[in-house]
Image (spheres, coloured by chain):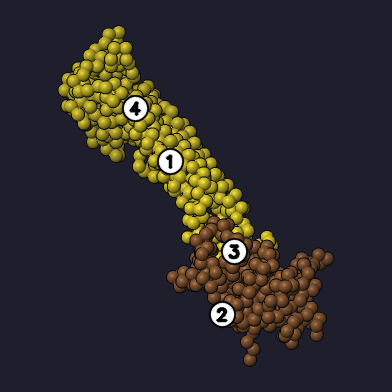
Chain colours: A yellow, B brown
Amino acid sequence: MLAIREMRRRKLQFALVTGVVALVSFLIIMVTGLGLGLYQRAGTALLSLNGDQLAYADNANLSLIRSRLTEAQVRDIEAKSGADDATPLGYIAAVIEYAPGRRDTAAVVGLVPGSFAEPRTIEGRALSSPDQILVDRSWARLAGTRVGDVLPLPVGFDRRNFTVAGIVDQGYFFFQPAVYVSLEAWQAIAYQGDASQRPAASVVLLKGKTLDASRGSGWEAVTKRTAFDNIEGVQAQQSTVNALRYMGLLIGAMVIGVFFYVITLQKVSLLGILKAIGASGFYLVTQGLLQVAVVSAVGALLAVGLAVLLQTTVLASSSVPIAFTTSAVLTTALSVLVAGMIGAGLSVRQVAAIDPIIAMQQQ
Amino acid sequence: MTDAILELRGVSKSFGEGDRRVDAVRDVTLDIDRGEMVSLVGPSGSGKSTLLAMVGGLLQPTAGAIVVDGEDITRHGKGARTRYRRDRVGFVFQGSNMVPFLTARENLLIVGEFGGVDRGALRHRADELLEELGLARVRDQVSSQLSGGERQRVAIARALMRDPVLILVDEPTASLNSELGSRVVDALKEEIHGRSKACIMVTHDERMAERADRLIEFRDGRLHSADARPETVRSSEAR
């Protein structure tokens, strides 16, 4: 096939453009990975909760950080929402000193041990006492924590030791690895002072796709998806990342388009000769598009390989929030291919417009 | 009953309009027979190449009919003209016009990629033509490594690949010395006679032109004189 032979015989020319396409594709994949990583860290722990909806204090503007529910409000939600099941949840960010002089912030989630909100452990056991803690595997990896280790959490001006009962796989909350304690322990960590003045929960997790009422006295309920979308900064962050992705695809399309346009201009006389000796415009356009497809596909594959290599080496031990999924990588690679084809549209028009008479005129 | 492969009937071609109108070819009527090689000579701008382009389906005449082996190509649309160039005509351009990154053999086989032919049979034909034209030794060399004479012979072989009825040749020896040019034209003539094709060769080189079976002179877009068989050459001016 003419297109493939040309690529084989003009290796340097096509290797250069394939390299550029690979770098642009790699950039797009990395930005996509960054978007996915940030998305996951924004609150996969929230999306992973074993429930359908969350009830907030109605003055919290759907902010988990600001939402505080009284005992009466929790009872009201349980009674009037019409949910199949309901359980209170607390949230607070706390600094945990996991080794002498080594601290990190964790999202401390309070829950009722044994309730449907308690995540399934992948190692160890479920919570059975107020002095126990479940840690997400992201925290375990970060801090080197194992089942049975003791983690000190700040309670007022003191510290209280929690024994790691199990490891869970729920992900992040507000860009922090999640740890889970009993609701009682959460109240102690989050609110000092008179126990009677403490909020009963931050939110109430509800089961059931539809509710009898999504609003009540001082509370409002929304789906987990809405709750996630209202996490501070998530929308703006994802919009920014998506803008970068689209910009990358546009640049990719332009790079491929311009390259093939220049190549087409260089080959006008040759294409004219081929038309003069019987090649149809369709044949020549097909050959051109085949080259675009090969360059884009090989470039995208190289980029995927580079991304996988990076993920398994540098990023494996890094805290950079970049995550890859097969579908995200494949979608990006496919997008590069499509962008390349669109970019090559310019050349297609050029090829179709070549008059075979130039085969005689260019002599 | 005529044995003409090519019949031109009152063919004219003009470019531009009004004051800028240029009549490149004027009312040409001409027959070329099977197995005949015709040289078309004349000064630059006399209309030779324009006539060749029209016969080759690269330009549409302004008036008249061009009938090739019974097929009036002036009635063809774009697609039919492409198929005509692919199947019925073989071109040999000045400077050979090879695909530079293909070998001599691949330059022949390229015409098989345009469709409408058994590619297996073409491979056999390519080897046969390379052998006949003394190119078997260089068949796997890319065309940029071939000498000028070899490139022109490859171009002739490519023109013959799809067994066309008509071969159109434009200044085939312009870049060759006279000895090499003579060998190329002789090789072409041998193929035309041996395979009963018809051929029009446009050339400025009188020595090459005289090697053809018939010599036709063009001036100011009209047929001026014809050698050997003047009875087949008719233009309105001549009449």
Amino acid beneath label 2: Arg
- Inter-mark Cα distance, 2 to 1: 55 Å
The numbered disc on residue A317 is: 4
> In the picture, which quadrant includes the C terminus of chain A?
bottom right
Marks 3 and 1 on same chain: no
Query: In the rendered structure, which amino acid carries the disc numbered 3?
Result: Arg
Q: Position of residue A348 (x, y in %)?
A: 56, 56
Q: Which residue is mark 3?
A: B151
Q: Which-is-in-front pick, marks 2 and 4?
A: 2
Q: Are marks 2 and 4 on the same chain?
A: no
Q: Which callout, 4 or 3, points to the residue nearer the camera? A: 3
| Amino acid of disc 1 | Ala
| Structural distance between the alpha carbons of marks 2 and 3 | 21 Å
Circle 4: residue type: Ser
Q: What label does residue B195 carry, if any?
A: 2
Q: Choose top left, top right, bottom left or bottom right for residue A51.
A: top left
Q: Earlier in the sequence, mark 4 or mark 1?
A: 1
> Disc 1 designates what residue?
A303
* Residue B230 visible within the image: yes
Identify the residue at image location x=75%, y=67%: B15
The chain letter for the residue carrying disc 1 is: A
**Viewed as shown, does residue A83 lie left or right of A285?**
left
* Nearer the observer, A40 or A319: A319
Left or right, B166 with respect to A15, comes to right
Residue nearest the observer in this picture, A359 or B139: B139
Distance between the alpha carbons at the discs numbered 4 and 3: 61 Å
| SS of the residue under disc 2 | helix
From the viewer's side, name the closer residue of A274 and A98: A274
Q: Are marks 3 and 1 in contact (CB under 8 Å)?
A: no
